[in-house]
């Protein structure tokens, strides 16, 4: 859907790209939805901002993570890099 701009479910040829997906924190502030937030006393570091592709007909939505290739695996709690078995 990201490359073809066609919905894989209903074949509609119009897709809405949304560069950030809204989320709320525990203080009810709106922030971008991300894979992980590293909280420091003076700021939060958000890693892996999620982006959405939405079919304009049926609403089917795909999520992708911006900058996936440069995410620091060792800073994402519980994350494991899985490689194709060859
Ligand atoms: Zn669709």
Image: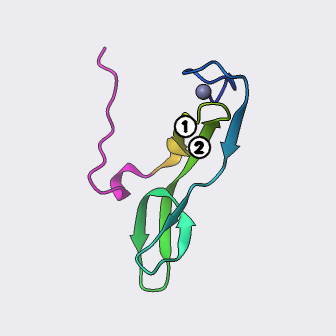
**Residue at image location 48% in from the left, 74% down from the top:** 44
Question: Main structural element of the magenta stretch: helix, strand or loop?
Answer: loop
Q: Earlier in the sequence, mark 2 or mark 1?
A: 2
**Residue at image location 66% in from the left, 25% down from the top:** 3
Q: Characterize the local packing of mark 2: few (<14), some (14-19) or many (20 or more) Cα atoms within 10 angstroms.
A: some
| 4 relative to 50, above or below | above
Q: Quadrant of ligand 1?
A: top right
Whether tag 2 and tag 1 are in contact, CB under 8 A, the answer is yes
Q: Which residue is mark 1?
A: 61
Regarding mark 2 in the picture, which secondary structure is present there? strand
Quick check: 52 left or right of 80? right
Q: Nearer the viewer, residue 84 or 1?
A: 1
| 38 relative to 76, above or below | below
Q: Residue furthest top?
A: 86
Q: Residue furthest left?
A: 78
Q: CA distance from mark 2 to mark 1?
A: 6 Å
Mark 2 near ligand 1 (CB under 8 Å)? Answer: no
Q: Quadrant of the N terminus?
A: top right
| 11 relative to 77, above or below | above
Regarding mark 1 in the picture, which secondary structure is present there? strand
**Residue 61: horizontal and vertical position, in percent?**
54, 37
**Residue 14: horizontal and vertical position, in percent?**
73, 29
Q: Which residues are magenta?
A: 72-86
Q: Which residue is mark 2?
A: 52
**Residue 23: horizontal and vertical position, in percent?**
50, 63
**Residue 41: horizontal and vertical position, in percent?**
42, 85
Q: Image quadrant of residue 74?
A: bottom left
Select label 2 or label 1 by which is in front: 1
């Amino acid at each position: 859907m990201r490359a073809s701009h066609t919905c894989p479910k209903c074949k509609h040829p119009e897709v809405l790209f949304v560069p950030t997906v809204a989320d709320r924190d525990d203080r009810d502030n709106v922030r971008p939805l991300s894979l992980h937030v590293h909280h420091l006393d003076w700021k939060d570091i958000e890693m892996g901002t999620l982006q959405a592709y939405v079919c304009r007909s049926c609403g089917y939505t795909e999520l992708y993570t911006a900058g996936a290739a440069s995410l620091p695996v060792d800073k994402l709690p519980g994350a494991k890099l899985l490689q194709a078995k060859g």
